[in-house]
Image: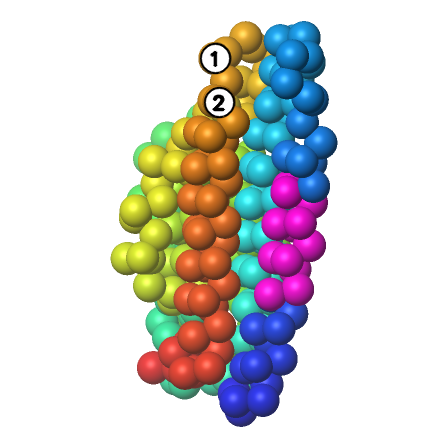
Amino acid sequence: MAQTGAGTFRAVLEDELSWRRDEVRNLRNLRPPEGSRPQLQESHRRALIVMLYAHLEGFARFVFEQYAVAINGLRLSIKEAKPQLSAACLDDRFRGYRSSATSDPYDPHGNRARQVMKDAELIQAILDMQLKYVNVPVDIVSSVESNLSPVVLRRNLALLALDDTGFHKFASALEGLLKLRNNIAHGKWLSLPSDPAFRKLEDRIFDLCETLMRAVYESVRDEAYRR
């Protein structure tokens, strides 16, 4: 992709991150004044945690979607693209292939024959794909399933052939935020982080967003999606 195209791509991501960061900051600045009821202070912190997670998940989905759309627009052949991208194109096929064959009560010994058919169907899907351009399924590679956990984040990075080594250091912060958000969503009582602790968590989460944005931008700039 041309440098001007990569620059425009990054600008779109930066604009997306900017408004999300501003919204979290604005909500944080609305904190109740000192001396307010403890319940009011806690309600504000709970809202901040939920909003912070929402913006992390929303930004991650946006970045993955934009990257997948950009790759699809290049009309790469299977031979040109990283093998992970080809695998992502067949994700639904692979899921069906990995699932155990449903047993047939009228043919208890037919499982081996059904496995042969599954093998043949997968081979045919791979052969058919060689005649097409890479078309990464946007909904699959940007999915956060029920939550954006470190496992889901790394899976999406792998599907898009993005290096995940720079993301290991954020695992504990992401897990901590996700646990807090889920407990709040389920109406559980919990000990909430203090204002300084929340600011530290907020900075860490937006550092994660910056790292994700940079990884995707550099891949577009350097055409790292190619073999």
Number of numbered discs: 2
Which residue does the image show at 69% across and 22% down from the upper left?
32
Q: Main secondary structure of the magenta part?
A: helix
Return the residue nearer the eye: 172 or 121. 172
Mark 2 neighbour density, 10 Å: few (under 14) some (14–19) many (20 or more): few
Give the labeled residue for mark 2: 194
User: Which percent across, then down, holds residue 41?
Assistant: 63, 16
Give the labeled residue for mark 1: 191
Residue 31 vertical placement versus 143 (above, below): above
Q: CA distance from mark 2 to mark 1?
A: 9 Å
- Residue 200, quarter of picture: top left
Horizontal arrangement in the rendering, residue 57 relative to residue 164 (left or right): right
**Residue range corresponding to the magenta coloring:** 14-25
Answer whether residue 154 is magenta in the image: no
User: Which percent across, then down, holds residue 128?
Assistant: 49, 75
- Disc 1 is placed on an element classified as loop
Asked if residue 144 shows in the view, the reply is yes
Q: Which mark is residue 32?
A: none
Horizontal arrangement in the rendering, residue 159 relative to residue 74 (left or right): left
Return the residue nearer the eye: 151 or 37. 37
Asked if residue 152 shows in the view, the reply is no
Which residue does the image show at 54% across and 23% down from the upper left?
182
Q: Are marks 2 and 1 in contact (CB under 8 Å)?
A: no
Q: Amino acid at mark 1?
A: Ser
Q: Quadrant of the C terminus?
A: bottom left
Mark 1 neighbour density, 10 Å: few (under 14) some (14–19) many (20 or more): few
User: Which percent across, then down, holds residue 92?
Assistant: 51, 54
Tell which tag, 2 or 1, sits nearer the viewer. Answer: 2
Which residue does the image show at 71% across and 31% down from the upper left?
30
